[in-house]
Image: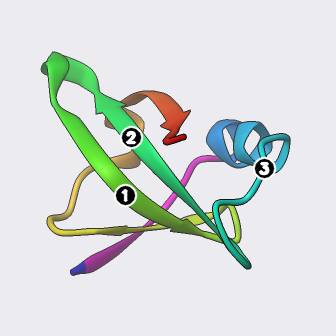
Amino acid sequence: MTTVHLPQRWIEQLIRLPESGMGYQRVDIHLKKGKILKGMVVLNAEEVQAPEPFEPSEIVDVQLVR
């Protein structure tokens, strides 16, 4: 597991969305080239706990899992 710090753009978006639990959100992260990281945990709207490293600049969308 690796921790990736999100760019400010995505932090601001996640701050406006509800939490999935205390201090975290569960999201799907869409990357360039069509890859989707499903069910990722984002702590405090800032840090993603991901199974593999990725470049934050590759993120094209972050969607809250409902």
The outermost residue toward the right is 16
Q: Is residue 39 above or below residue 58?
A: below
| Residue position for label 3 | 18
Q: Position of residue 20 (x, y in %)?
A: 64, 61
Q: Is residue 51 left or right of residue 27?
A: left
| Residue position for label 1 | 40
The outermost residue toward the top is 33
Q: Is residue 32 above or below residue 28?
A: above
Amino acid type, label 2: Asp
The one nearer the camera, 12 or 36, is 36
Amino acid type, label 3: Pro
Quadrant where the C terminus sits is: top right
Q: Position of residue 38 (x, y in %)?
A: 28, 45
Q: Are marks 2 and 3 in contact (CB under 8 Å)?
A: no
Query: How is the protein colored in the picture?
Result: rainbow
Q: Position of residue 22 (x, y in %)?
A: 73, 79
Real-space Cα separation, disc 2 to disc 1, in angstroms: 6 Å
Question: Which stretch did the figure color magenta?
Answer: 2-7
